[in-house]
């Protein structure tokens, strides 16, 4: 909320515009959404705005849902990366086992 809100109160529409949100104010308040911590911070801000009446409930719900979807996408990307690492490790272990079997087989033949 604008710290000068009180002085605008007697000036009619200026008070409302001081507390209304626009793209610049929202982007400044949120910053980029890069980490789960950013998501948590964004949810806290949305909650305050909704309770303070700065955004309608439907807007708050839509913003919360957008953060939820972002979190799911972020988790899916992390899961894909872990799976990729596990597949790589399995391939390495399979190669080690194959090498060990070949070495044992050679020893038996000799």
Image (cartoon, rainbow, N blue to C red):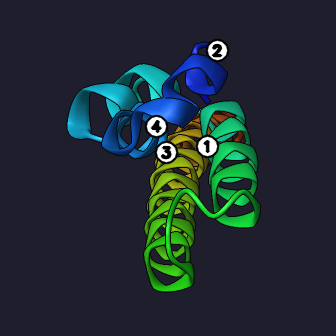
Q: Residue at x 75, y 47 (%)?
A: 44
In this view, 106 is above or below 29:
below
Closer to the chain start, of discs 1 and 2, is 2
For label 2, the SS is: loop
For label 4, the SS is: helix
Q: Residue at x 64, y 53 (%)?
A: 49
Q: Pick whichever, 70 or 78, lies toward us.
A: 70
Q: Which residue has dot 3 on it?
A: 81
Residue 32, percent from left and from top: 40, 26
| Residues at marks 1 and 4, CA–CA distance in whole angstroms | 25 Å
Q: Which residue has dot 1 on it?
A: 42
Q: Nearer the viewer, mark 1 or mark 2?
A: 2
In this view, 44 is above or below 68:
above
| Residues at marks 1 and 2, CA–CA distance in whole angstroms | 21 Å
Q: Residue at x 41, y 32 (%)?
A: 11
Closer to the chain start, of discs 3 and 2, is 2
Do residues under tags 1 and 2 come within 8 Å of each other at their CB atoms?
no
Do residues under tags 3 and 2 come within 8 Å of each other at their CB atoms?
no
Which mark, residue 3?
A: 2
| Residues at marks 4 and 2, CA–CA distance in whole angstroms | 11 Å
Residue 72, percent from left and from top: 54, 67
Q: Which residue has dot 4 on it?
A: 15
């Amino acid at each position: 909320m604008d710290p000068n809100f009180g002085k605008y109160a007697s000036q009619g529409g200026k008070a409302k515009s001081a507390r209304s949100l626009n793209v610049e104010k929202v982007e400044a308040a949120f910053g980029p959404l890069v980490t789960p911590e950013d998501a948590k911070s964004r949810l806290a801000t949305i909650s305050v705005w909704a309770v303070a009446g700065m955004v309608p409930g439907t807007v708050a719900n839509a913003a919360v849902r957008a953060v939820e979807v972002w979190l799911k996408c972020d988790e899916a990307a992390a899961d894909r990366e872990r799976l990729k690492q596990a597949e790589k490790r399995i391939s390495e272990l399979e190669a080690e086992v194959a090498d060990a079997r070949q070495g044992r087989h050679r020893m038996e033949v000799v």
